[in-house]
Image (cartoon, rainbow, N blue to C red):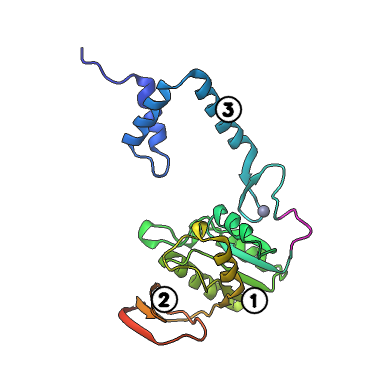
Amino acid sequence: MRVGEPEALRKAVAQLSRLAGVGPSLARRIVFHLLRRTPEENQALLDSLRHVLQAVETCSVCGALSEKSGCPVCSDPDRETDVICVVEETRDVLAIERSGRYHGQYHVLGGALAPLEGRGPEDLRIAALLARLESGAFKEVIVATDPDMEGDATALYLAKLLKPLGVRATRIARGVPVGGTLEFVVQSTLGMALDGRIDLVAVRRGWLGTYEINGTRAAWARQVAIGPIGPIRQFTRTPV
Ligand SMILES: [Zn+2]
């Protein structure tokens, strides 16, 4: 009889393979690695996983991950209540908090628009954002999605939705490298980007293309008004 993998091992690999970024071969390596560790080490890992799943949840207001005992931002009475910062993930909230320049509310979208990956507006917490804004409590929305193609497309989509609400919409700008990820931007740079934010203007029609602005090459999902800028060199453009 041909010897195959034990059923339990196959099941564990199948479960791990379903995690984001973990394929079958990495899942198999993890399981084999775990089987080589001591029972005490594995028990500590299992306990910490069980604890995080029990103790951490998504805040029903801002969408950030927080202890079940209460969201540290939404439950803080000392924070500003008339400004809200829209980010893609909880890690971006933590990055902005590390900058120490922002003391308002947050709204975590849970990602950015990515049509090629099948992620549309209904997959993000956009309806929840609009519901929060309808209360009229916020004077400004700072859109701090990642400065990459998807983040910019999301910012422009939001600008269009926010325009009729009459709320000021701004986008973090200066100091954030194009194509970067907020999580890895140094604290002072992110602080500058928050201070130097610019009004986000919705354009009805635009261009998909690559531009060079003030010597920095940038890809824009759509043309966006970014305030006083230098000469724009254009490489490609397609109407959208
Ligand atoms: Zn919250």
Residue beneath disc 2 = 222
The residue at the far right in this view is 77
Tell me the kind of residue under disc 2.
Answer: Arg
- Which residue range is magenta in the image? 74-79
Mark 1, residue position: 167
**Which of the pair 87/11 is nearer the observer?**
87
The x and y percentages for residue 94 are 60, 54
Q: Quickly name the residue at label 3.
A: 47
Q: Amino acid at mark 3?
A: Asp
| Label 2 neighbour load within 10 Å: few <14, some 14-19, many 20+ | many
Q: For the C terminus, give its image quadrant.
A: bottom left
Q: Which quadrant of the figure has residue 177?
A: bottom left
Task: Give the SS element for disc 2.
Answer: loop
For label 1, the crowd category at 10 Å Cα-Cα, with few meaning under 14, some 14 to 19 and many 20 or more, is some
Q: Residues within 10 Å of mark 3 (few under 14, many from 20)?
A: few
Disc nearest the viewer among 3 and 1: 3
* Residue contact between numbered discs 3 and 2, judged by CB atoms under 8 Å: no
